[in-house]
Image (cartoon, helix red, strand yellow):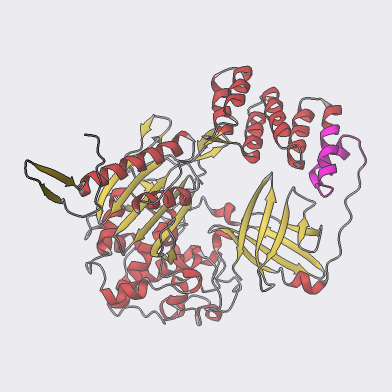
Amino acid sequence: MKNKINILFSPIMILKKKYILTRHWITVFVLFAVTPIAFAQQKAKQIDDLMGRYVDNGKFNGSVLVVENGKVIFKKGYGLANMEWNIPNTPDTKFRLGSLTKQFTAMLIMQLVEQGKLKLEGKITDYLTDYPKAAGDKITIHHLLTHTSGIPNYTNLPAFKTFNRNRYKPADFLKQFSDLPLEFEPGSAFAYSNSGYFLLGAIIEKVTGKTYEKVLQENIFTPLQMNNTGYDMFFKILPKRATGYDRWNLEYENAPYLDMSIPYAAGSLYSTVEDLALWDQALYSDKLLSASSKAIMLTPYKSDYAYGWGVYKTQIAQLKDSVEAMGHQGGINGFNTSLIRIPKNKHLVVLLNNTGGTNLGAMQNNILKILYDQPFDLPKISVAYVLGKTLATTSLANALKRYAEIKKQPAYYLNEGEINGLGYGMIATGKIREAIAVFNLNVMEYPQSFNVWDSRGEAYMLNGEKTKAIMDYKKSLELDPYSMNAIRKLNELGEKVADPKEATVEDKILDTYVGKYQLTPSFVISITKEGARLYEQATGQPRHELYAESESKFFMKAIDGKILFVKNEQGSVEKLVLFQNGQEMQGKRVN
């Protein structure tokens, strides 16, 4: 008999019999529910398929762990922990955590508060008597924990790259930012600041008389048997430690060195996905902290930030009700990380990646959809990624043939910026002929984009094809009269082109753009005004003057970049959009 088996979603196995009686026979229908183990296995396979697609797409290289209803249902490593020795990632590979460190620092602070050794309303100068009093007398522990202190973020300082290789004692490093003027009155605004958590580490050491590393070990890692977690220092021999890499288009390189005395209590820890599952489970108990203190620690303040955690409501696909989530992401040279927990259902997703910046948020959200039995889409495959891999292993003709085969297939996606980046990757390795061929594809696909003509013009210049370069740069300028790179290149090629005429913007409108805009936790653009001129300065980069293309859109002459200011429905400027190298990034206004 052809019949359908209905699956009952239940935490226990159900065996239900229905008897239908007639004069001559009895038919027995048995309805079986699939056990929780079978459901978990099904979800584990879906997660594996999902992450495998990200891996095949060059978007993930690391380890994953997923907890459902308090039980680990999936853990696996993907890609390589060390590319030189071809050593694979596994669930017990150790990764640098970056800013996931902050939740551990916050826990230590709350333990000290519970012991009566610290007060949340206590001032910096109550504990660090040498700290400048002008700021230290009014900034509290609470301000430091919630990123509302107003202390400038030291990783945003222009000089950061000049001292990030040096080893510092905490008291010495504090001098890098302690004398800087506050960005706002403490408590009045939110601005993500590693400086605040660095200070918390120094306060922990002062109050306990022990190193931050030792307090972590004694108060958290040893009690929870987190034997694969600790303070990462480069000189230590650390078994199963992943190497951090950055990816330039399709090529990987070792990430720049960063001495871990600098991230310190803001980002210095290493761990495994398995140990972070132990940490998650401990937060459901009173082993480390009382329930009342945990409630304080996990109460969100400005911008949904609690003490070391983002705490917020999130809507998962088509679910009627939102759920409360607690999470954080981290990024540090060669690594980026993500941890999210849903306390109501005891769900946890941990993603640790050792190939620099990638969009872990998209992966995390898809895994949550799987946990809640919601529809999700497998990520499409990048045409640019496949094209680049094919170019690396076969002829240009074969690569172009492969491109033509897949570019319109539903499982693949085409992106102008990625194709453009691949072209520049070819230039970087001296493959100018291949670069021109790649840029040709972009010109055919996106003929109304000024940037694709600009990029091909550069390749023609490098190849000595001056006439073709001039034609492409003129086309780029026709599409965007404010393209300063095209103007500069045309002048270099002997074509005299004047700078574009700047629009006039009222002074009071310029004033509304002044502020800080956070594009990522570690990348901020500051907009300042001097006289009637606006200036932008991005994290770790020189300052550039802005020139008005319109009332809300500005261009830069020194570099190829534009900024658009966006207002909300109330007419207030709430974000900016940065356009650079054919890409765009949005930054939320934080003060």
Q: Residue at x 47, y 69 (%)?
A: 304
Quadrant where the N terminus is found in the figure: top left
Q: Which stretch did the figure color magenta?
A: 471-496
Task: Pick the residue in front: 41 or 464.
Answer: 41
Kindly tell me whether residue 99 is visible in this rendering: no
Task: State the residue lying farthest toward the right.
Answer: 496
Q: Residue at x 29, y 77 (%)?
A: 292
Q: Is residue 585 magenta?
A: no
User: In the figure, 14 relative to 142: above or below?
Assistant: above
Horizontal placement of 507 versus 567: left or right? right
Kindly tell me whether residue 482 is visible in this rendering: yes
Horizontal placement of 160 versus 481: left or right? left
Q: Main secondary structure of the magenta part?
A: helix
**Residue 363: percent from the left, percent from the top?**
44, 47
**Residue 298: percent from the left, percent from the top?**
37, 70
Q: Is residue 487 magenta?
A: yes
Task: Pick the residue in front: 323 or 385.
Answer: 323
Quarter occupied by residue 159: bottom right
Task: Pick the residue in front: 46 or 296.
Answer: 46
**Residue 503: percent from the left, percent from the top?**
86, 61
Quarter occupied by residue 452: top right
Q: Residue at x 83, y 38 (%)?
A: 475
Quarter occupied by residue 154: bottom right
Horizontal placement of 137 versus 13: left or right? right
User: In the figure, 451 relative to 324: above or below?
Assistant: above
Quadrant where the C terminus is found in the figure: bottom right
Horizontal placement of 99 versus 454: left or right? left
**Residue 470: percent from the left, percent from the top?**
86, 33
